[in-house]
Amino acid sequence: DFEASFIRLIDKVTNGSRIEINQTGTTLYYQPGLLYGGSLEHDCSPSRGIGYYLESLLCLAPFMKHPLKIVLRGVTNDQVDPSVDILKATALPLLKRFGIDGESLEIKINRRGMPPKGGGEIVFACPVKKVLQPLQLTDPGKIKRIRGTAYSVRVSPQMANRIVESARSILNKFLPDIYIYTDHMKGVSSGKSPGFGLSLVAETINGTFLSAELASNPQGQGAAVLPEELGQNCAKLLLEEIYRGGCVDSTNQSLALLLMTLGQQDVSKVLLGPLSPYTIEFLRHLRSFFQIMFKIETKSPEEEEHKGGAKVLMTCVGVGFSNLSKTIR
Amino acid sequence: MGKAPEQEEEDARRRNPRAFAVQSAVRMARTFHRTQDLKTKKHHIPVVDRTPLEPPPVVVVVVGPPKVGKSTLIRCLIRNFTRQKLVEIRGPVTIVSGKKRRLTIIECGCDINTMIDLAKVADLVLMLIDASFGFEMETFEFLNICQVHGFPKIMGVLTHLDTFKNNKQLKKTKKKLKHRFWTEVYPGAKLFYLSGMVHGEYQKQEIHNLGRFISVMKFRPLTWQTSHPYVLADRMEDLTNPEDVRINPKCDRKISLYGYLRGAHLKNKSQIHMPGVGDFTVSDVSFLPDPCALPEQQKKRSLNEKEKLVYAPLSGVGGIVYDKDAVYIDLGGSHAHENEEEEVRPNHELVQSLISTHSTIDAKMASSKVSLFMDSRPLDSEDIERQEFVMPKEERAVDVKTGRVRRKAIFDEEKENHDAVSDEEDDQEEEEMSEDGSDGDDEDDAEEESDREILGEEVVVGSAKRLKREVTKEEAVNELPAFADSDDDLEVSSEGEGKTAPEESDMEGEDSEEQESYENESSDSEFEGVRKGVTKSEQYEINREDEEMRSQISCHNLKKKAVLTTDSGNCTAEEASESEVENSSMEEGGDDEGSHGESEVDALDGKGFRQTREKKMGSVKQTELKAVEDEEDDDVENLLKEEEEYEEKIDFSADTAGALKWKEDLTQKAAQVFLRQQQSTPNLRKLVYGTVAEDEDRESENEDDELGGLFRVSRPDKETKQKANALDCSKFLIEKPQDWDLEEVMSSIRDCFVTGKWEEDKDAAKLLEEDEELYGDFEDLETGVVHKGKPAAEGDESGSEQEEKEGKMSKAEAEEEEKKKERMDKKRKLKEMFDAEYDEGDATYFDDLKEEMHRQAQLNRAEFEDQDDETRVQYEGFRPGMYVRLEIDNVPCEFVLNFDPHYPIILGGLGNSEGNVGYVQLRLKKHRWYKKILKTRDPLILSLGWRRFQTIPMFYIEDHNGRHRLLKYTPQHMHCGATFWGPITPQGTGFLAVQSVSGTTPDFRIAATGVVLDLDKSITIVKKLKLTGFPFKIFKNTSFIKGMFNSQLEVAKFEGAAIRTVSGIRGQIKKALRAPAGAFRATFEDKLLMSDIVFVRTWYPVSIPAFYNPVTSLLQPAGEKDSWRGMKTTGQLRQERGIKLKQNKDSLYKPIVREKRHFNKLHIPKALQKALPFKNKPKNLEKKGKTPRDQWRPAVIREPHERRISALITALSTVNNYKMKKAKVKHRQQLKEYLKVKQKEEEQKLKRQKEAKKKIYRMLGQREKKRQKSSLKGSSEGDKSM
């Protein structure tokens, strides 16, 4: 279902690609076309969050022919996929590190939609780039502030405040500079299903972002979640993420690695936390597609250093990819 | 000396400041502007310098029209650099030209294909020009080709200067040619003069100078070349299975090509293009030792003789010479022999010969071989001889294993060499003779030996003579397939290794050959299994086999086998770990026994099953190259290691459990854990990349490739399976969150926050302190407070405190150190500050950018510096500068059959999507020297990227509204767009077009040049289409039009479209009519006539023919390589077939005949006439034109008398007239004179008056003066002026 929607999305952003699916839906023939971009709209399937679609768009968007500006409709926050809030807070600064910059790079949340019915809407815009800059990101720096968004749609606005209180109670032990916005959507912009959740982002002095999030159970599935509990759990998740550490948080590892691979033929380095299974799989794909292997070095924490767990230093030489669809005048 | 003028200037400045002031602000501004302009003009966009530390040889292309002296020049250059004379030059010649530079010299013929290909890879072009003739078309063509494909350095060389007898003429020609050359290349481009020949060669001094110029030249990186890997192949070999060739001589071939890699990093299995052949995927790449290496130590001033290497396998230096159907092995000239002698000699000749290998069929093999030899005891001739005797007749086996006929020859050579060396290097002539003799003798023996011992070293060893050994082609090919795939390579090498282990070979005895073949097979399957990780069952089987063999040795192992199998079956970590524990404990006992048993088995000999076991052992053994230790022990250890690793794979959590299996001791366990942590890097990599990542070191990898390999492969597979079913999500879910309420857990990340502890060098307090020290005392002037810097001792104290805590070190020493460090730090800081202060002013954006690029370049170099080549290749691909061997499958047989070394073979690497085809938009301009214009839809040969191909471009021009309108022909002196269906090439790439690549024409051949603008999968070119119709009913402004469309539907599509009549009345299509199909109602701004023609202007998208035909000039038979003909243009076809174009009569031009315009008379009605005023009334003049006869007046006829009177009167009047005229003239004259006189008088009069006035005024003035003098002081000046 969501795969079909994804294929349709890919078809929209490309030009000249051929997609054939057989009758039973077991085989897919895909002949890639040219990334075209432009102003588009897409209705995502509510069975997965918009994050699922947005993640792949983040990988593709810098290499379009025309700057991409796409309206995605569906579930903005759910329990499975990285939410739009998180991607907005962490993936965009990461893209900027690669030289993908400009005022048009943004994600805007017009409406929030929670599972199961969705009804959210976001706008994602990204400029195009010819080549990417190599990345040297080996020092995450220290966390200077924690920001977050507690959202609640179609439930009492008090929920968000309760989440904030509980999350702060944990995080305040570490850092005073915490600010969690409460975002209560009303009316049309609140989507079709009730729900609430929290996303937290920790920013370091070197400008790297680590994030964690949690959302309430969708309506009619599972037990009801107390907002206090959710806030505390989410704060703990953030601490866990900080414990893992690295310059790129765990959801964006693959994005960072992909963009490093697609860079110029220069050495790129990035310090990551432990590789997630998804990233490992992604690395294998990178090797089969680009014949590229990363040099993986483990940095285990030294004694007397309270900086969380072991880190991984990934190094690679880019393949020298350049945007072939961008027109020159 | 320098100071004096300065001083003077200073003085001058002081003396006369105005002279040095700004005269004109505008001018000043202008000069400033100009200097800035000049400065910025020199800037190039900084690029990251990606040249490797050891760059590939510089490609020097020698170009020129025929008979200009290209080959002579190359020969002279080679001789200049290497003191060696090459008789025939074919293909590229690589030479060492200096301490840091090598050159690859290649000659470029006049074939336009060759010129295009070589222009793409050239770093330096030596452009030969026949001075006695002047420039030729080829020169200009080549220059234009260069311009399009990135401009390499071009140096002109004038030859045939000795043909000039007249010195003045010579000078004039030189100057003329120089200036023309400058306009083409750049002003000041270097032009060399080669005057005269001496004994068929250029003068030594001149060549020497030229050589020096070449070897110090600097090159600017060219975009295309630096972004693509490419190889200028200097050797080609056919690896096809001879059987296939026998069955089908036209079958696709598998070839290997050799050459230096240039440009960018090359990845294995990447796509390449061979210009003139086509696109291929590299099936295998490997790097070989450099056949023409730079000297190692750089201290010396110049190269000594042995380092002046030359490498040109295609022309028979340091390699093999090809002939129609035979292979000649060249054993080097005298020079090679010298090399040999001067080489640092290892203690054994054979080893030496192997090391000094210049060109190997497969150096990987060779190297492994060498290492083996080095490690084990070196083989000596006795050994060889013995082996010869041991197996004298194994010719069939030889065939299976592919008789290395070539190798054999070498082997002979080596032996001979060995002989020769032992003979204390006798006279070379004599040696030749002996060689020849021995050659004949040893031939049989050698065949067997070679395939056992030496794996393909056509070493340029010893002997001075170039030994030709003719072998039938079939045989030559026969031997090749052994190297077909790397698997085999490995096997063969391992096999060889196994054999060299002396006990092995002894034991195996007579039927070792057979065994080996078995071994090959078995190991083959194993390898395959490992590679692909296909079927686990197979692997288990092998596993089991292994175990079974073991079981025969000891009963313990039987148990273990069972355990192991269950192991592999299970996936859960706990179980596995448990079983591991058991296993390990059992093994503890079993290992020793096993080793005993094995040694026993060793003692026993000759039984079949044992032999098979032996094989297994051997294969395990082979992999561990360090056969120093006891075999059995190693084996067991291997197993253990494998198991351990397997464990790690299964679960990290099981680590501790796994540690148990090794040794029960607790301390040992701890050590183990630590060790594992250390090893976690490769483990992580293995986890990610599986077995194929044999990077750390081949040997360790191979050690456990049997068991460990299996597990490692299967793991990722399982994972992927799980993955496939699982949700595809990038979120990293936490299975076991830590309890963040606990204090110690919390403290584990305490330092990640700004509130935590900082590092020494970043601690703010510390920094502040340091700063304070630096600046020391300062007084706040406003408040008058004196701030005192902390005495340094305080800082020391704090430092020493720490030290005290840490331990009791010798305090004084430490303090000393500390102080020293501090001082250094201080100094450094001051320096940095100073630098910052003074450099900041100059640092521009450009400098910053450059700095950044420089930093990146350094990082690039440093990152993989310390790793060995094998590992580096894994990470970054094959780097430029390496000598690589590329295997390519499915090459058309014509390439091999019609191989001609005179034509360059280039392997151009393609980027990621450059292998695809699509629509490419170009900006194109017809070359101004090309005589004809180009027609849309005529096939054209483009050279774009690496490729040369024929395609059908469509020309278009962009209208103001962005529409791409199709053109029928290219415009004359303007750019136009072009779109074709062809290979995707990055934007900004230049291209050139030619109409045909075959033959030579006196005209300029390059038809057009341009650049790629855009790549697309859809087309935007449109063509104008006018639809016409006729009115069949006209109302006031509305008309019904028919004949424009055929159906209502068509009309509906065009509703609202603007239409127009030929006379210019505009209108709009309104709605379709029912009655005649396709008719419609339209409104116009005026009433139409029935004779009007109505038309609508539409744009029709043009489809582009998907025609893409690579120019396969290298597949042409020898001698016809420049005669490739592709698709013909319609014009050519018509001309050939004599088909006249049928012309439309209407479109012929005819003389325009204009009928005289006839206007009717203006008719004014009578009533109107009456009403008109008289003035405007039509006057009917013609009415009274005719006078009646009666009103005619009669003519006057004079009388004779009257006639005379009248004649007289006329005569008189004439006279009178004349007189009057004369008088008039006279009168005028008089008047003039009178006026003159009068004027003179007037002038006189005026003059007099003036004089008088003057006098009077003077008098007056004097009087005045006097008066003034008398009254006051006189002003003298006023009078003086008078």
Image (spheres, coloured by chain):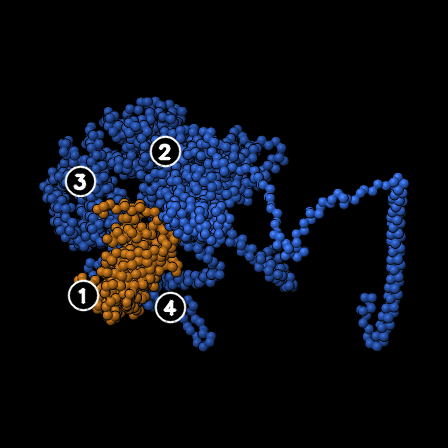
- Distance, label 4 to label 3, CA atoms, is 69 Å
- Distance, label 2 to label 4, CA atoms, is 69 Å
Which tag, 2 or 4, sits closer to the chain's start? 2
Residue A224: mark in rendering = 1
Q: Residues within 10 Å of mark 1 (few under 14, many from 20)?
A: few
Give the labeled residue for mark 4.
B769
Q: Residues within 10 Å of mark 3 (few under 14, many from 20)?
A: some
Would residue B625 be found to the left or right of residue B1212 on screen?
A: left
- Distance, label 2 to label 1, CA atoms, is 73 Å
Q: Amino acid at mark 1?
A: Ala
Q: Is residue B817 above or below residue B111?
A: below
x 89%, y 44%: residue: B1209
Give the labeled residue for mark 2.
B236
Q: Residues within 10 Å of mark 4 (few under 14, many from 20)?
A: some
> Same chain for the residues at labels 2 and 1, yes or no?
no
Which tag, 3 or 2, sits closer to the chain's start? 2
**Closer to viewer: mark 4 or mark 1:** 1
Which tag, 4 or 3, sits closer to the chain's start? 3
Q: Residue furthest front?
A: B1190
Q: Amino acid at mark 3?
A: Glu
Q: Nearer the viewer, residue B186 or A44?
A: A44
- The residue marked by circle 1 belongs to what chain? A
The percent position of residue B270, horizontal first and vertical second, equals 33, 42
Residue B538: mark in rendering = 3
Would residue B1186 be found to the left or right of residue B695 on screen?
A: right
Answer whether labels 2 and 1 touch (C-beta < 8 Å). Answer: no
Secondary structure beneath disc 2? strand
> Which chain is blue in the rendering?
B
Secondary structure beneath disc 4? helix
**In what quadrant of the picture does the C terminus of chain B appear?**
bottom right
Q: Nearer the viewer, residue B353 or B1248?
A: B1248
